Amino acid sequence: MRLMDMASWQSQLRKGAAELVLLTVLSRGEAYGLEILARIRSAGELVSEGSLYPLLNRLEKAGRIIGRWDLPAEGGNPRKYYRLTDEGAALAEAMRAAWIDFRTTITTLVEDQP
């Protein structure tokens, strides 16, 4: 596989997993954008800052997450905190189950050698 093909393939893998990863992070509690990014990056480079905010906006418009602005009394920068809606929590659980099935299939096919 050429290097460009490999980079494209890896990019598509990350894009495909981004929504599941974001919903999983938010299933652990409310967080603001850079906090979400830090939590994701603690496990690996799956989501960039440039792709995080469009994904947050899309999920908010779809009703899967809800955001609220926090304006610090001491004059700090305002932050938008996000949390899952009931629909988002149900989707996160369904996506986790689908991921486990998918991962099991891929592991069986790719890693188990006859």
Image (tube, rainbow, N blue to C red):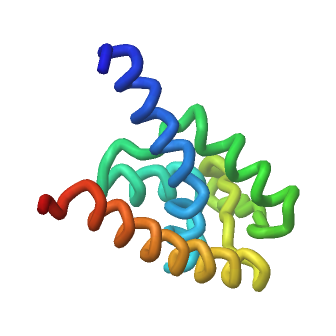
Q: Nearer the viewer, residue 6 or 50?
A: 6
Q: Position of residue 76 (x, y in %)?
A: 60, 50
Q: Residue at point 45% right, 67% down?
A: 102
Q: Is residue 84 above or below residue 49?
A: below
Q: Can you give x and y, in whole percent of width and height, for residue 77 in the image?
A: 63, 47
Q: Position of residue 54 (x, y in %)?
A: 71, 41
Q: As drawn, is 56 to the left or to the right of 63?
A: left
Q: Which residue in the rendered view is the most extreme toward the front?
A: 114
- At 66% across and 60% down in the image, what residue appears? 72
Query: Image check: 77 left or right of 46?
Result: right
Q: Which is nearer the eye, 29 or 86? A: 86
| The C terminus sits in image quarter | bottom left
Q: Position of residue 59 (x, y in %)?
A: 76, 58
Horizontally, residue 30 falls left or right of residue 45, namely right
Residue closest to the eye, 107 or 32? 107
Residue lying at 71% horizontally and 63% vertically, measured from the top left:
70
Between 23 and 97, the one nearer to me in the picture: 97
